[in-house]
Amino acid sequence: MKVDTLLTGGMIVTAQDRFVGALGIRDGRVACLLDSAAGVDAQQVIDVSGKYIIPGAIDAHVHFQDPGSPEREDLEHGTRACAVGGITTAISQPVNNPPVFDVATYRETLAGYEGRSYVDYGLHGGASSGNLDQIELLWTETGAPALKMMMCYSPKSYGMVDDGQLYRIMQILQKHDGLAYIHAENQAIVETLEKQLRAEGRTDPLSYLASRPSWVETEAVRRALILAEQTGCRVILAHVSCADSLEMIGEARGRGVSVFAESCPHFFTFIDEDIVEHGPYLKFSPVMRDEPNLRRLWELLAGGAVQTIGSDHCPYAPEEKTPGLTNIWDAPNGVPGLEVLLPVLLDGVSRGQLSMERLVEVTSLNPAKIYGLYPRKGHLSPGADADLVVVDPSLVKTLDLQDLQTKCPYSPYLGKTFRGWPIMTMVRGVSVAEGGAITGAAGHGRYVSRTN
Ligand code: DUC
Ligand code: ZN
Ligand code: ZN
C-alpha cells in the first residue's frame, strides 16, 4: 500500500479502544490503520513511539469575536491557538458584530473567514428576540451546526430570548431536526441579585459569584429541559457548570429527551474562591462552583454525563478587564481557553480521573455526531479526514505566556502545570503545529458544514 505519511509506533486511541500500530494518510484522509508498518510504501514516516495518536478535538464553543472586535481576538490568532492546542475543527459562535442572525450575515461572515484559518472551522447561527422570522431559513439555508440562544444577557448586545420565544424557536427547529444551543441562566434572578449586591456597596470579585448561585443555572436548565421535552427539539446545554444540572440532564436523557450537555475546561480547573486571586480575569458566566462540585464534575465526566467539552474561549482586551480590578461589575465575562482544553483533560487522564477513550469521545466523536460533522470528522477510521493529535502523555509543562497563540495576553491558566500535551497537530494530513510552534499556514483551514 502507498501512503503520503505514515505515523508508526503510537498508541492509536478511538472512543472504543486503543492499540499500538501505524496510521497511514493519503490525500488528507486516513488511509489505513495497521498493526505493523511492514509492506507500506510511505513518502514520509514519523516515529511516534511512546506517544498517543488521538482524533483532533472539535471545539464547538469558540468566540473568535470576528468580525467586530479585533482588539480581543480574530480568526488567525484564534485558530493558531487551536493548532497548538490540538483543536482541528473550531466552530465559531455567532456572537459577533454583526451577530449571525440571518442567512446573508452567515454568508458574509464566512466570506470574511476565507483564506485566514489555520484549522478547519464551522459557524453557528444565532437566535434572539429580534430574529424569530429568520430562524427557519437560518437553519435550512446554511450549514450551521446549531443555533445559539441565551436565556440571559451574555453579552447584552446579542440579546436574549424569553420563554415564549425559546419555545417558538424550538418548535421551528424541531420541524427540521435542528439543534438549539442554549445558554441557561435565569436573567431575572441574576439582575435582582446584582442590584441587591450593588446596593450593599459590594464591588469585590466574590460578589459577582454571589449574583449567580448554582440555582440560577439549575432552574434555567430545568426550564430548558421541559421545553425540549414538550417540543421534541434537539437541545445542547452550553457550558454546564453544576453537577446538579448534569444529573437533571442525564435523567431527561434517560427518559428519551434529545438533550446533550457541554461543559468547559475552566469548570474542571477552578473553584469559586479562585476569583479572589484572579478577579476580572476569571470572570465568566456561568461561574465556577465549590470544591465538592468540581470533584463531582470529574466523576460525572468519567461516567458519561458530559457529552462534549467546549472551551468557551472568549477573550476581552486587557483594558476592558482592568476596570474590574477595582469594581468587579465593570469587567465583561469571558476567559481564553483554546490552548488548554486538551491539557486540562490530559492532566485528568494522567491522574486517573478519566480514560483516554472518554477524552476522545467528549472532545471529538460526540461533537462530530451532535453537530453533523460525522463521519468526515471525529474518528480515525479509513476514509475520515486525517485530523489528529500526537500527544505526549508524560510531558509535564507549566503554561507560560509564550505558549499562547491567542491575541489575549493574559490567562488564568498561566503558571498551572499539566501532565500530557499535544506535540503535533495535523489537519487533513498536514502538520499545523509541532512542539507548541505553528507549522501550518493561514488558509489551510476549510469551512465545514453540517451534513444532516
Ligand atoms: N459566558 C458566556 O456565556 N459567553 C462568553 C463568555 C462567558 O463568560
Ligand atoms: Zn454562554
Ligand atoms: Zn460562550
Image (cartoon, rainbow, N blue to C red):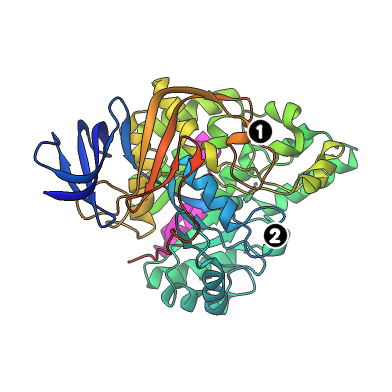
Residue 290 rendering spot, x and y as whole percentages: 61, 27
Residue 297 rendering spot, x and y as whole percentages: 48, 31
Q: Helix or strand or loop: what does disc 2 sit on?
A: loop
Residue 47 rendering spot, x and y as whole percentages: 27, 32
Is the Cβ of the residue at disc 1 closer than 8 Å to that at disc 2?
Answer: no
Side of 223 where 235 appears, left or right: left
Residue under label 1: 412
Neighbor class of circle 2 (other Cα within 10 Å; few <14, some 14-19, many 20+) is some
Relative to residue 420, is residue 181 depicted above or below? below
| Gap in angstroms between the C-alphas marked 1 and 2 | 21 Å
In the rendered view of the protein, which quadrant contains the C terminus? bottom left
Residue 270 is labelled as none
Neighbor class of circle 1 (other Cα within 10 Å; few <14, some 14-19, many 20+) is many
- The kind of residue on which mark 1 rests is Pro
The answer to whether residue 257 is visible is no
Relative to residue 141, is residue 432 depicted above or below? above
Q: Give the camera-side residue of 111 and 361.
A: 111
Q: Furthest residue to the front?
A: 43
Q: Find out whether residue 385 is within the magenta segment.
A: no
Side of 164 where 274 appears, left or right: right
Query: Count of labels shown?
Result: 2
Relative to residue 291, is residue 429 depicted above or below? below
- The kind of residue on which mark 2 rests is Ser
Q: Earlier in the sequence, mark 1 or mark 2?
A: 2
Q: Helix or strand or loop: what does disc 1 sit on?
A: loop
Q: What span is colored magenta in the figure?
A: 223-245
Question: Does ligand 1 reach within 8 Å of label 1's beta carbon?
Answer: no
The answer to whether residue 64 is visible is yes
Residue 339 rendering spot, x and y as whole percentages: 53, 39
Q: Find out whether residue 237 is within the magenta segment.
A: yes
Residue under label 2: 69
Question: Does ligand 1 reach within 8 Å of label 2's beta carbon?
Answer: no
